[in-house]
Amino acid sequence: MLCDFLGRVIIEPTVVEHQSGQLRSMTQTARAAMEAEGIQDSIVGVEVTGIYHRPVLQAFRDADFDTREVHSFASAHFRQTLHPNAKTDDHDLEAIFQATVNGFGLSILPVKEPYLSLQQYVRCRRTLVKQRAKLQTQIRDKLHRTMPGYTELFENGHFFDNRAAIMIAKAYPSAELIRQQGAKAIQQYLKSHKVRVMAKVVDKVIAWSQQAVAPDDCFTSCSDIWMKYVTLHEVISSQITDAERSIASFLAQTPYILLLSVPGINVISAGEMAGEAGPIEHYASAAALNGRAGLFPSRYQSDEVDRRGGVAWSCNRRLRAACILMAHNLIKCHGYYRGRAELMRSKKVATRDIECRIANRANRMVFQLVGGKQVWRGHGVNRDYLLRKLMLFEQSRQTDVSRIASDLTAAAMHLRGAVAQAEARQLPVAPQRRRGSVQSIGELLVPLLIRLGAIDRESLESATSEA
């Protein structure tokens, strides 16, 4: 629908399918009608509907229209005011028009790579982690019906992190089979599959098998089901690892990599923050970041009534979740924020409230570090070396050494002066490799270390020639 400023309808409401031809025809028709009416200035208002409004939004942007996004709350407000007892598509279009001309059309700054890909991988990993957590509960349930008490043998719920525990259960899926095989046969089986295990772990399993209760009547079917679940669990875990490799690579291309210098913030926390917050240039201050995340209490005031409620409910929930995750890690691992949290606990502040307050305060630090291209300093807490932190994370995910070197080089682009040299001194330096040997990460980092000033090219060449 096309209207002039006074609301006179120029183009009646028209159905447009999300196809390239129809979208192109829509923009051309709007342009022709504007020229015929002598309209020089125009604004296109598109109501936000999840992701389904984006093709229309992009079509008008590509056609050089001043395109604005209208939040559904704004259009609903005008629709309910104009037509309180009726809701139709035409009334929705009228409400979108009223919201746009009254200044509720928002100019959203476009987000480009690497933030777009980082956001997708962060959300993908989050979904996979939730699915794996549900699957682990199902595996424990079925396994308890076939091998009661077996998962409790492994401390702190690390059953799924113990490769030997899962392999023993898959090879000998009952207490009776474990008793028949004995410790020596089990150790030999694990050794043949190149799985290292301490003898006391196998002895613990044997001791359990000798006093285990009888399995459920549906032993056969439950065993088959939990083994299939374990196979699916391994697939999901592999996909999570792949997603984490991608998160590390894209994070290294953004200034949010500087957050790794803060003790308690790891690659996943920084990646979640970067993916959901987007470019720091889109925020005028740390207060804008906190406002978008809704890290402040709601309030109701009328006459003499003035009460504060819970945390604000109208916000970007994914961004707030990323901020709370970061705050949780800081409370656990960072001395300064842990001290502030303990002070709040002594004043009987609720745990959720503590995390929101720490997240609000931590976002000021995020804005300063990322916006100012700085690393952590102050409050009597030493900083972490972010390049080494990134390297160790990727090595734990068995990332290819060439990719690690590329990511470290990209991350080093955000470092300056003495900080860059201090970071480079924490990286390994390898001499010339022997013929036929595998290239190490230290060799691939030599160009980066030379550029950062950690080593001298002449001294390296002389050391290589002497070798």
Image (spheres, grey):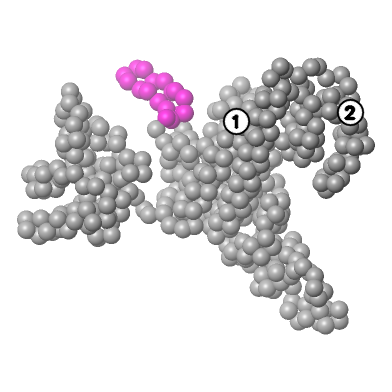
Q: Secondary structure at mark 2?
A: helix
Could you say which quadrant of the image residue 145 lies in? top right
Left or right for 198, reference 151: right
Marking on residue 180: 2
- Of discs 1 and 2, which sits in the foreground? 2
What residue is shown at x 43% (from left), y 30% (from top)?
312
**Could one spot residue 144 in this view of the protein?**
no
Q: Position of residue 402 (x, y in %)?
A: 66, 65
Seen from the viewer's position, the closer of residues 433 and 191 is: 191
Where does the C terminus fall, quadrant-wise? bottom right
Magenta-highlighted residues: 297-313
According to the picture, the residue beneath numbered tag 1 turns out to be 134
What residue is shown at x 69% (from left), y 33% (from top)?
227
Magenta stretch contains residue 194? no
Could you say which quadrant of the image residue 12 lies in? top left
Where does the N terminus fall, quadrant-wise? top left
**Could one spot residue 175 in this view of the protein?**
yes
How many angstroms separate mark 1 from mark 2 (CA)? 33 Å
Magenta stretch prevailing secondary structure: strand
Q: Position of residue 293 (x, y in %)?
A: 46, 39
Q: Residues within 10 Å of mark 1 (few under 14, many from 20)?
A: few
Relative vertical location of residue 189 with respect to residue 392 in this rendering, above or below: above
Q: Secondary structure at mark 1?
A: helix
What residue is shown at x 70% (from left), y 54% (from top)?
398
Amino acid on which disc 2 is placed = Gln
Amino acid on which disc 1 is placed = Lys
Relative vertical location of residue 281 with respect to residue 416 in this rendering, above or below: above
Seen from the viewer's position, the closer of residues 434 and 221 is: 221
Q: Residues within 10 Å of mark 2 (few under 14, many from 20)?
A: few
Q: Position of residue 109 (x, y in %)?
A: 36, 53
Task: Identify the mark nearer the N-term, 1 or 2.
Answer: 1
